[in-house]
Image (cartoon, helix red, strand yellow):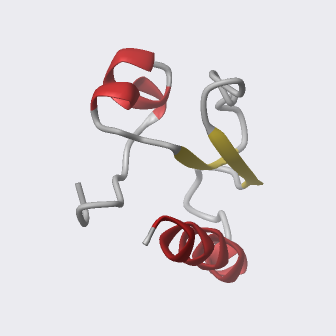
């Protein structure tokens, strides 16, 4: 839990419907190259493809990621 409305997790967390539901997760930002959106009928997803390697350019997806999180924050608050 980074903040009361923002969590960071791995593919292990993202494929556990029980964990996501128990935490009150409503939307998932999936920044990966191979992790599927496991529960598209249950959660709002934003998918950004990025390879999980040392040379993956995370800077290139920051604005898109922040925009998604910001919109959700203002929608739910």
Question: How many numbered discs sit on the rendered protein?
Answer: 0
Residue 14 higher or lower than 8, as above or below: above
Tell me where residue 22 sits by quadrant: top left
Q: Nearer the viewer, residue 57 or 23?
A: 23
Residue sitting at 56 percent across and 69 percent down? 75
Residue sitting at 42 percent across and 18 percent down? 16
Query: Left or right of 49: which side holds 74?
Result: left
From the top left corner, tell me how far across and down residue 69 is, in percent. 55, 69
Residue 63 higher or lower than 34, as above or below: below
From the top left corner, tell me how far across and down residue 14 is, in percent. 48, 30
Query: Left or right of 45: which side holds 54?
Result: left
Query: Left or right of 16: which side holds 26?
Result: right
Residue sitting at 62 percent across and 78 percent down? 62
Q: Nearer the viewer, residue 69 or 11?
A: 69
Q: Quadrant of the C terminus?
A: bottom left
From the top left corner, tell me how far across and down residue 32 is, in percent. 65, 46
Q: Quadrant of the N terminus?
A: bottom left
Residue sitting at 35 percent across and 16 percent down? 18
Residue 65 higher or lower than 32, as above or below: below
């Amino acid at each position: 839990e980074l903040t009361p409305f923002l969590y960071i997790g791995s593919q292990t967390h993202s494929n556990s419907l029980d964990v996501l539901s128990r935490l009150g997760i409503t939307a998932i930002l999936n920044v990966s190259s191979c992790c599927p959106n496991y529960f598209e009928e249950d959660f709002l997803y934003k998918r950004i493809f990025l390879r999980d390697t040392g040379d993956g350019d995370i800077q290139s997806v920051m604005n898109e990621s922040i925009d998604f999180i910001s919109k959700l924050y203002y929608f739910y608050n």
